[in-house]
Amino acid sequence: MKSLKELEEIRQRALESVNLRKERGGTRVVVGMGTCGIAAGARPVLLAFLEEVKKRNLRDVIVTQTGCIGVCRLEPMAEVYRPGEEKVTYVKLTPEKVRRIVAEHIVNGKPVTEFTIGAADKQ
Amino acid sequence: MEDISLYILDLVQNSIAAVATLIEVSVIEDLQNDKLILSIRDNGVGMDSQVAKKVTDPFYTTRTTRKVGLGLAFVEAAAQACEGNLQIFSQPGNGTEVRVEFKYHHIDRPPLGRIDQTMAALVACNPSIDFVYTHITPFGRLNFDSREVRQRIGDLPLDHPEVVEWIREYIREGLDEISGGGGV
């Protein structure tokens, strides 16, 4: 069984690994969590982002949520904001697509064009 | 929505929009009375009785960007399909409680789903809000309170990846222990 004591150990470990996400000027990922998004599968998408951030120890990436982004038929959607770059909107996401977006866009700076809203509209 | 954990995720969005700082979610599996009772209570801005009467109407919303609001309408329809109902208790300035009852053994009653994932997602995205989760079954009771977590982690934020993972596991293990092996 999980104990509250473990939280203190997590705290110790985290404090030892310096600059604890202090500079919040990094990449921001915003997942649409309106009724439409949730019904379409936003939760596994959000959890996949969190898991990748944890696994890759990406300290300057923030994953957060918003309401309905406005194109419900393309949910689950997420927006990626990298400092100094234009926002990229990804549509019809799955946890598999998220793993590619984290690796190629968030880590390596190259948006996954085929998953963006622009590509979806051409279909 | 496929299951109750997704309805919770959706209903809590209303509390977040109402700028709540404390959101209490509870699920009671009352097998004696054949009921499953879901309650979401917040300390947000609340609403008057006129608004509270209209919010389960799919064509009522407080948003200005579009004209539909399906969250509460969906939950009410799901509850009514299971001989249940949805009630709203609210006052301006005094927060809101949404209480949903389902007949427990109704064939159409949605399964509980992954409540651990719902709570982890909520905490990760809203680290400044406090969440309480209580789940009662005939086999026991699970209590989760993010304020207790905060006390232990000090200046570490609630959305630290390892803290979020701890919360998810804590709730998952706690629910396993009180599920009585049934797993609904």
Image (spheres, rainbow, N blue to C red):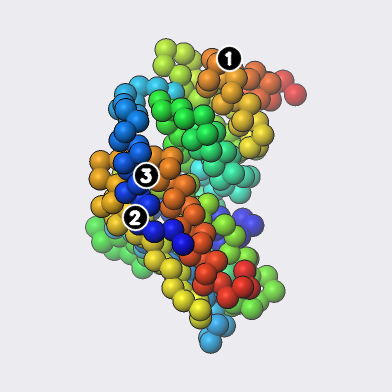
| Chain where mark 3 sits | A
Q: In the image, which is nearer the foreground, mark 1 or mark 2?
A: 2
Q: Are marks 1 and 2 on the same chain?
A: yes
User: Residue B45 sits in which quadrant?
Assistant: bottom left
User: What number is the disc on residue A10?
Assistant: 3
User: What number is the disc on residue A67?
Assistant: none
Question: Which of the marked residues, 1 or 2, is nearer the chain's N terminus?
Answer: 2
Q: Secondary structure at mark 2?
A: helix
Task: Judge whether residue A111 can be spotted in this image.
Answer: yes
Distance of mark 2 from mark 3, alpha carbons? 9 Å
Question: Which of the marked residues, 3 or 1, is nearer the chain's N terminus?
Answer: 3
x then y, percent, for residue A113:
65, 18
Number of marks in the rendered image: 3
Label 2 amino acid?
A: Lys
**Tag 1 and tag 2, C-beta contact below 8 Å:** no
Quarter of the image with the C terminus of chain B is bottom right
Quarter of the image with the N terminus of chain B is bottom right
Above or below for B29 versus B156: below
Label 3 amino acid?
A: Ile
Write down the residue under mark 1. Answer: A110
Observer-nearest of A101 and A35: A101
Observer-nearest of B66 and B3: B3
User: Residue B47 sits in which quadrant?
Assistant: bottom left
**Tag 3 and tag 1, C-beta contact below 8 Å:** no
